[in-house]
Each structure stands twice: as structure tokens, then as C-alpha cells.
Amino acid sequence: MICAIDATHDPNLRSWVESANEAKTDFPIQNLPLGVFQRLGSAETPRIGVAIGHQILDLAACHTIGLLDALPEPVQMACVAPNLNDLMAMGRSASLPLRHHLSQLLRVGQDPITVSQALVSMSHMQLLLPAQIGDYTDFYASIFHATRVGKLFRPDNPLLPNYKYVPIAYHGRASSIVPSGTPILRPSGQWKRPDDAAPTFAPSQLLDYELEVGCFVGVGNALGQAVAIAQAEDHLFGLCLVNDWSARDLQAWEYQPLGPFLAKSFATTLSPWVVTMEALAPFRCPAFARPSPDPQPLPYLTSSANQEHGGIALTLEVFLSSAQMRQQEIPPLRLSHSHFQQMYWTVAQMLTHHTSNGCNLRPGDLLASGTVSGMEAGSAGCLLELTQRGTQPIRLPTGEARSFLEAGDAVILRGYCERDGYTRIGLGECRGQVA
Amino acid sequence: MICAIDATHDPNLRSWVESANEAKTDFPIQNLPLGVFQRLGSAETPRIGVAIGHQILDLAACHTIGLLDALPEPVQMACVAPNLNDLMAMGRSASLPLRHHLSQLLRVGQDPITVSQALVSMSHMQLLLPAQIGDYTDFYASIFHATRVGKLFRPDNPLLPNYKYVPIAYHGRASSIVPSGTPILRPSGQWKRPDDAAPTFAPSQLLDYELEVGCFVGVGNALGQAVAIAQAEDHLFGLCLVNDWSARDLQAWEYQPLGPFLAKSFATTLSPWVVTMEALAPFRCPAFARPSPDPQPLPYLTSSANQEHGGIALTLEVFLSSAQMRQQEIPPLRLSHSHFQQMYWTVAQMLTHHTSNGCNLRPGDLLASGTVSGMEAGSAGCLLELTQRGTQPIRLPTGEARSFLEAGDAVILRGYCERDGYTRIGLGECRGQVA
């Protein structure tokens, strides 16, 4: 079931953590995203925390000083684990009471003296991957991206006949998923210019980012047990941002017939904060309205609840900051923005399709959306599209041109939900700099 | 470095475990494959064992009675873990002394009274997955398979231009890897007959097996640190058999442009015993000799050691047993046999290619070879090839015809190494029955 709007979404709620009440904060008290952190440079056991303004509420510390005593014992245990997997596995019966409890602890009216003992400054902490990710699946759910990229690779055949029926996806590499801030090394690999007789093994010349939204699986399903579309939302835990770095030259040469492999597996960056499905309740919206000649999804991917509320009104942005820009103190340049509600498939449809053959998903598995591109040219979620495979370079404020990423380029993804009558919430930042 | 032949391979060695001395056993004292087991139907913590004839030497029990005391403490600790990951991570400096020690414990001359306390009967045990598999990668390394399958899917373009340069692979699904003996549920999914206007969601009609060899990664590599071909063997732990079950109708409809997804992710079966690279030392052979018009591999995939000894002389077999055959007590029918040394890429080349972009492999990761098919029609490692996409059904001894798998069909993969002057060793059995 799609999460309901409740008292924790009340726009009048304010936190005694002052920075959580700033107008443009990603982490007001209505958000309460979960993540995993440790002190910068320490090797201490990672702890679960909740982002609130510029601070983190340390759940392990909360537990030590008795602030979680009101929660059921298994939820308390999950809160002191070194990652979110246990909490994810428990589903709404854990995440909903936890959200209500955290909202109480952090709101104005609560005596801050005790709770503030469990607050740490986000800037002193290293943010880690939120979960142990067993399997990572990458979808291809933007029809605008699929069409535009298809045109570049297959001019006469941009959108394949299966696209409007199948939520196309491939298995990604879990081992090379890294948290925001991890430097990105330019991969080497085989690539071939059209006129070359044979490929070369050399550093990629066409390094790209991909703006994506990731969804963590909460409750898993057993092997052989498909999850019906009506139950799919119960298995979604929350969202983060994903940069699926791509080496376009490696990709073009290797991808047939089995799909992308080394062009993607050198690194995938995640934003550290998981915005829960509970927090997103006010921003649910209808699924993408297919233009009339398009077929409707097959029945196993169809429900009226999904049709009416399966979308998520989430605005996404990509910024680029070159080394020269940072030297000259020029702020990052926004390259594009797009809207997650324009994806051809909802997250629930992705999950149901994924399990429709009996495939088991485990708590902490990651489903990424694929590049989120919109209809308009300025809404393309990767350089391949934005620069038309490098033929129309972007001009940076320093006068530099960019066809693809260069050394020192930092790519910053951001995402937020806004709606009249509700408090804006954000996904934070997903950042990676090319080494 | 490729493992050397040593005293543990001496064909004159015999075990005091009598069944290990039988002529056709897969598990003589020269093999000593490692696996993970628990008592049938129990929920006890899994233990590491060594197959010897029809018995298992229980390493946790060995440790308890002091039989591992001669090994370094970290190796002892790895031997009492619930899976092989720790041992895999330690590399040859652990696996080689362990092999020598086990060979001593089990050979004639050793007093069996103490050691036999740690022996259990294999038939009373449930064999589990040998390792926690972080990522599973499936290659496509048989040029005969790629060409024959390519012809069926792309008649005018069977072998793509990248094939002879790139060890083609895709990321597989780790969560649905199951141990030998696990029932296989026929998946449902989208498929479309050529003349249908739209796809159907229904149980797969074209269920197939794929005969593959799996290689477990031993020592891992850090993200960003490619493994050179000269070091690749140091990262290989050992081999098992893999049945990469495939729904051909789902595959044909979904695989473009991002490769196979639900057509494969419903189940992948592994044989339980990992035959170590040490055990395989006598059976190393030259890499596949490319016919003269073929390009040589690029330099990063080339070494003289790999050229001369990178192959593994391993014979593979597929057997089918239908429900009717079992009723009539007809033994399984051998459908095909093939030779692993005919693969276009060696396992070392697969590993080096996989890490060439900096992708990190972790101990326990699984690299599967792709379907092992040979040159001759009778050596095809899947029904898609054997029956020419179902157009030339196989006749079973009961008179039944098989284009693809039917309910009750059991598929049994076997593999063994034989060489004059050495004792035959086997990989055991990889079995799965369609529910």
C-alpha cells in the first residue's frame, strides 16, 4: 500500500534543531532520512543516523541513553546495527513507528537537553553506504533517454519494440558502488573508432555521468514468490540519488549482445541519505500518462493505485564544477533538470516486473531507475544526450568546453520534492569528482 | 602463478577412506575439494568440509579435536567459518598448506582412528552454496556457442565484431544462485511469438539449461586496481559446475538492448564442491589455439604462461532424466559432452578483463564461463543449440521428444579431468529438476 500522509508531514512542525527549519534545507523534520556514518577518518563501527538540518541524530547514541526505549525491542536492535538492512527487512511495521518516534524527539516542544547528547555535526562525519547491497539492478525507465540514446547508437531503430511493454533492466555490479564523495578513477578499456581496424586498450575518452534515482528494497521476497503490483509498495523502503558513471567508448564497443559491463562497473556513486517512502507520501502523484497510441502496461503491471499514485513528484538536477571553476570560485553550473514523475515505469512496476519470474529480492537490494531525462533537450540526464555524443559541447562559465568529463570535474546530483501546503524535502547530494 | 604439481598429486597416494580409491570416484585423495554442508534438515550452522570418496571430512570437527593445530592460526579460523569466503580471501598461502595437511590426514599410513571421528557420510548431509557470492558474472567464452546461438537470433550477423577481442560478459543475479538439488520453478514472463501483435505474460514455454564452469575468486582486488594477466591466476580459487537456467522465450523478447535479465535471474544452480586450482595443476594445458585468421588477444590479455598453461583440460557432460525415464528405471541420457579447453578465453583472461577497468572483485565472487559448447553438433551445451531452437527435438529412450525442458525433467551436469600418469578427479554433480 502507498504510504499515507499523517501528522509527521504537518508543515507547521518545527524542530528545535534550528538548521532544520531553514527554508531550503533538504532535511527538515518532515523528512527524517536514514543513513550510516562514522567519525571522519575513524575506523569505528558504522552507526545509523537521521539527517536533521546540518546535524545527524545518532541512533546508537539514542539507544544508549534510553531514547528508543518506547520502540519495540526488534526495532531498537535494528537501529543499532551497522547498516540499514535489518530495518529495511522489517517493513512498515518498523519504519512507521520509528518515524513517528523520531519526529517526536526532534520537534519543538520536546526538551532538547537529553536528545542533543545524541546529535553530531554532519560536517564532522563520513557518510557511508546506507546498506549492504546484495544485488544492484539498473532499469532504463525514461523513454526520453531511451529514445535519444537509441538514436545515437541505432539511428534507424531508436526505440526497440519491447520498450513499451518491458521495464528494461540489467544487472549492475554491486561491489563497485561507492558513497558520495569517493573519487572516480577514469577507467581503461577496449574501444574502437569507426575507422580503426582493431580496438585499442586505453583510458576512456568518453567518460559520462548518469542522473538516476535509486530505490532500496525493504521487505524481501522468497525465490519463486512473485510480488503482485498491489503489494509492490510494501517492499519499497526509500530513495536515494545514483550516479551511474559510464564510459561511452567502452560501452559502444562491448555492449552487444549481452549489454553494458565494464563501461559501468568501475564505479556507481550513491547519495548517503535514504528518504523513506513514508517521507515521500505527500509527493505521490499519478504514473506517467502514456500518449494515446502507446499500449497500456500488461495486467500484471497494472493497478489503479499505481496508476493514480504510483509516481513520485521529484525534481532532479545535475551540476558540474570544473577545477578551473573552483579555482575562480565560480559556483557549480546546473547542466540539466528533470522530473522523476515522467518516467515510463513506476518504481512499483519495476519491482513487480523484477520478481515476476520468481527472482528473489533481498532487503538492501538496490533498484536504480536508469537515466532520468525529460522531454526537452535541457532535461537530459547525461552528457551523451546533452552534447549529442560530444558533437555539441557545453560551454562552462570559464570558457572551457565539455563534450565528456575531464580530470578534476565534479558532478553533483541533487533532488527535491515540493508541493503547495507541504514542506519541501530533499535527497541531499550525490557527488563524485574525476581523479 | 599457475599452481605447480607436487606430492599431493602423486597417483600412488591412496586414502584410508576406501571409497576414495574407487576407479571412477570424483573425489580421490588427489582432489580434496572444499564445500559447505549441514546435517540434512537441520538448522545448525553450516560447516566447511572436504569431499573424500563418499565421505566428508568435517573441518570444524577436525579443529575441535586438534587435527588442524599444525596450521597457522588464521587458516584454522578460516576453516571453522560457515562458508569459504575467509579461506578464499587468504590465497595460496592458506590453501596450499591446507591441501598438504589434508592430504596427510587422509592418506594411507595416517592412523585413521582419530581422523575418522571427523568423517561424516555425504549422503546424510545437505550440501550448501560454498561461499557468500557478492557478485556473479557470466561470460560468453565459447565461440562455438556464440556462433551457433548468434545464428539463431541474428542469422546474417551471428558473431559480432567485438567477440574475438572482448571476453564478453554480463552481470548475473547473485540472489537466485542455489545449490545443486534445489527444485527449479518454471518462470513466468513476457514473450511474444513473431506473428503476435503484443507480448503475453505466461509461463515460459522454452525452458533451457546451460552447461557452464564457474570459477570462484580467491584474493580480491581493490577498486581501481586492475589485475595484470601475469597475476590473474593468484586470484583464482577453484572451479565448480554451473547450470545457468534460461527461459529462451523471455530472453528473445527482453534482451535488447541491455542483455539478458529475467530470462536468467529465476535460478542458477551450482555444484557444491569447489575443486581448487591446486588440485587442477596436473590438468593445465595450452589456451585455445585460435585459427590463423583470428586476431591475437590484445597485450593486456596476453602472457606466455597463459598461452602455454592457461587452459584446463576438463571434460563436461550433460545428462537428462525425465519423470518417465525414472519411472521405467532408465538411467539418465547423456545429451552432450564438451571440453573446457576449447573456450576462446581462459579463466585468467576473464578475470584480468573483468578488473581491467578497475572493477573490484571480492573473495567468493563467481565468474561463470558461459555455455561450454564444442565445435561438433553433439557438443552443444544447451537445448537451444542442440535442438536448433526446438526445431530438431531430441528423442529420449522412452520415446518422448524434447525441444525444451518439461516438468519433472532433471538436468545433471558432470565434469572431470583425466590425464595419463595422474589420478582422475571430478567436479561432482550439479543437479536440478524442473518442478
Image (cartoon, coloured by chain):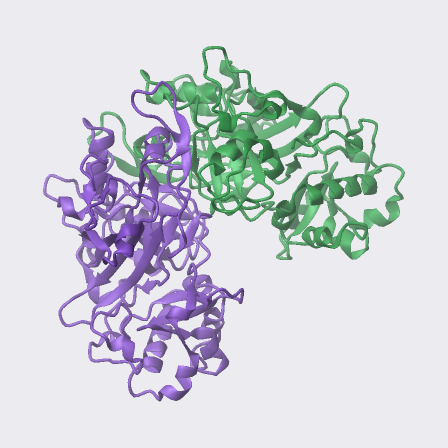
Chain colours: A green, B purple
User: Where A27 sits versus B181, above or below?
Assistant: above
Left or right: B354 with respect to B47?
A: left
Tell me where residue B174 appears, x and y as whole percent: 44, 48
Tell me where residue B425 appears, x and y as whole percent: 24, 67
Q: Please say whether residue A435 is visible from this viewpoint.
A: no
Left or right: A282 with respect to B21?
A: right
Q: Please say whether residue B376 is visible from this viewpoint.
A: yes
Tell me where residue B389 appears, x and y as whole percent: 23, 35
Front-lying residue, B352 or A393: B352
Residue in view at x 23 percent, y 75 percent: B22
Q: Quadrant of the N terminus of chain B?
A: bottom left
> Residue A217 is drawn in which quadrant?
top right
User: Where B64 sits versus A288, above or below?
Assistant: below
Front-lying residue, A356 or A40: A356
User: Where A263 sits versus B306, above or below?
Assistant: above
Front-lying residue, A128 or A374: A374
Front-lying residue, A10 or B196: B196
**Residue sitting at the far top:** A292
Left or right: A289 with respect to B147?
A: right
Number of numbered markers: 0
> Residue A121 is drawn in which quadrant?
top right
**Residue sitting at the far left:** B292
Tell me where residue A62 appears, x and y as whole percent: 78, 51
Residue in view at x 27 percent, y 73 percent: B28
Residue in view at x 63 percent, y 24 percent: A309
> Residue A162 is drawn in which quadrant?
top left
